[in-house]
Image (cartoon, rainbow, N blue to C red):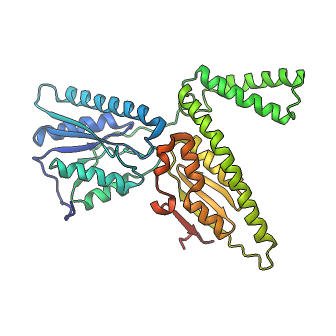
């Protein structure tokens, strides 16, 4: 579906509305319904399933997606009132991994092509990648596909992240266990009565104060159990990577020519959520030759000391391991940062090499 983009909308055709969790979604639906009633009475609400909706989180995400589409359809019926409005809902991208704006635009454009749609109404706060700002480049790709793209005039509210979330026994117990083990580690695991009592008291205090803040999502026993098992499998692999990198860096340091090549790199990791990204950032830092300097969303800025360490980072071995922990074996099939084009070398001036 490659053609010159239209310079005006088709006032007599169906409308496609990409759906995602947003503070302005309700206003977008109301606007799209009004426009659809004037343009023929047909509207399609479509949600693109992100690449991270796989493995253990797949069922939860599918349930949330279906619920959101049902909610949007109900809103549309309410706004239409007695008017004749044909409402369609669909999920696209479920059989592949969507990484960037071009992927989202491609699956949305394909849906539009299949259903004879040439007009797209995009929520100004639409961000299917969560904290990844892809709206502008996605709109540009949709226009290049020959679609008329518009944003509804909505009132944007200031979005503030929730500091406190729903707590639970599992959140409390998990944080208590982590805090207690860390306390015993600091005390040398003497397991003396004093250390056990003070450790339990400290862990209880930490868990009581922070269990509603520490975890971004409500923990589920089955999911946590599987992730812990995978973590046990991942740990020896991480130790192997650390030992291998230690030997490599030692060789470079002892080499007469000192063949180091320090570079700053950027990697957009195929992980979702604060905990997986943090796990990858720490794994990279623990591995000699690489140091995570900054994280922002899914993006990592990493200092690499030698070319071999940089190549390993771009090949995504550690990223694949962390994906395995949080998403299961299906996530291993995701392409590496090099294959996705999600990595680059930055020189001292901040330009791409």
**Side (left or right) of 140 relative to 320:** left
Quarter-of-image position of residue 259: bottom right
Q: Position of residue 144 (x, y in %)?
A: 26, 62
On screen, 202 above or below 33? above
Q: Position of residue 119 (x, y in %)?
A: 20, 50
> Between residues 181 and 331, which one lies in front from this camera angle?
331
Quarter of the image containing the N terminus? bottom left
Percent x, y of residue 348:
63, 71
Can the viewer see residue 218? Answer: no
Q: Front-most of 270 and 137?
A: 270
* Residue 144 higher or lower than 151, as above or below: below
- On the question of residue 100 being in view, the answer is yes
The count of marks equals 0
Query: Residue 79 location in percent, x, y?
Result: 21, 29
Residue found 79% across the figure and 21% down from its top: 201
Looking at the image, which is closer to me, 79 or 227? 227
Q: Residue furthest bottom?
A: 257
* 52 lies left or right of 79: right
Residue at image coords 30%, 33%: 69
Residue occupying image coordinates x 63% and y 42%: 233
Q: Is residue 207 above or below residue 335?
A: above
Q: Nearer the viewer, residue 96 or 186?
A: 96
The quarter in which the C terminus is drawn is bottom right
């Amino acid at each position: 579906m490659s053609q010159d983009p239209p310079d005006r909308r088709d006032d007599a055709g169906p409308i496609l509305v990409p759906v995602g969790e947003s503070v302005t979604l309700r206003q977008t639906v109301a606007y799209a319904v009004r426009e659809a009633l004037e343009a023929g009475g047909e509207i399609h609400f479509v949600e693109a399933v992100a690449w991270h909706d796989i493995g253990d989180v797949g069922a939860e995400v599918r349930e949330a997606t279906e619920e959101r589409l049902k909610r949007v359809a109900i809103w549309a019926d309410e706004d239409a009132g007695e008017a004749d409005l044909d409402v369609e809902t669909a999920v696209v991208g479920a059989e592949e991994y969507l990484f960037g704006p071009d992927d989202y635009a491609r699956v949305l454009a394909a849906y539009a092509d299949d259903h004879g749609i040439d007009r797209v109404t995009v929520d100004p706060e639409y961000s299917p990648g969560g904290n990844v700002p892809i709206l502008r480049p996605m709109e540009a790709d949709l226009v290049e596909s020959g679609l008329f793209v518009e944003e509804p005039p909505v009132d944007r509210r200031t979005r503030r992240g929730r500091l406190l979330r729903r707590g639970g026994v599992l959140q409390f117990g998990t944080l208590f266990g982590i805090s207690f083990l860390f306390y015993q580690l600091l005390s040398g695991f003497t397991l003396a009565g004093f250390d056990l009592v003070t450790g339990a008291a400290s862990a209880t205090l930490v868990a009581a104060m922070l269990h509603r803040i520490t975890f971004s999502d409500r923990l589920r026993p089955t999911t946590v159990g599987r992730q812990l098992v995978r973590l046990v499998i991942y740990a020896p692999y991480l130790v192997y990577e650390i030992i291998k990198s230690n030997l490599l860096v030692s060789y470079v340091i002892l080499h007469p020519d000192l063949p180091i090549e320090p570079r700053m790199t950027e990697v957009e990791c195929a992980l979702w959520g604060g905990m997986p990204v943090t796990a990858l950032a720490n794994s990279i830092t623990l591995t000699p030759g690489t140091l995570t300097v900054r994280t922002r969303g899914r993006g990592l800025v990493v200092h690499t000391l030698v070319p071999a360490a940089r190549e390993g980072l771009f090949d995504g071995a550690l990223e694949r391991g962390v994906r395995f922990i949080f998403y299961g074996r299906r996530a291993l099939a995701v392409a590496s940062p090099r294959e996705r084009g999600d990595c680059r070398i930055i020189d001292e001036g901040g330009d791409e090499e």
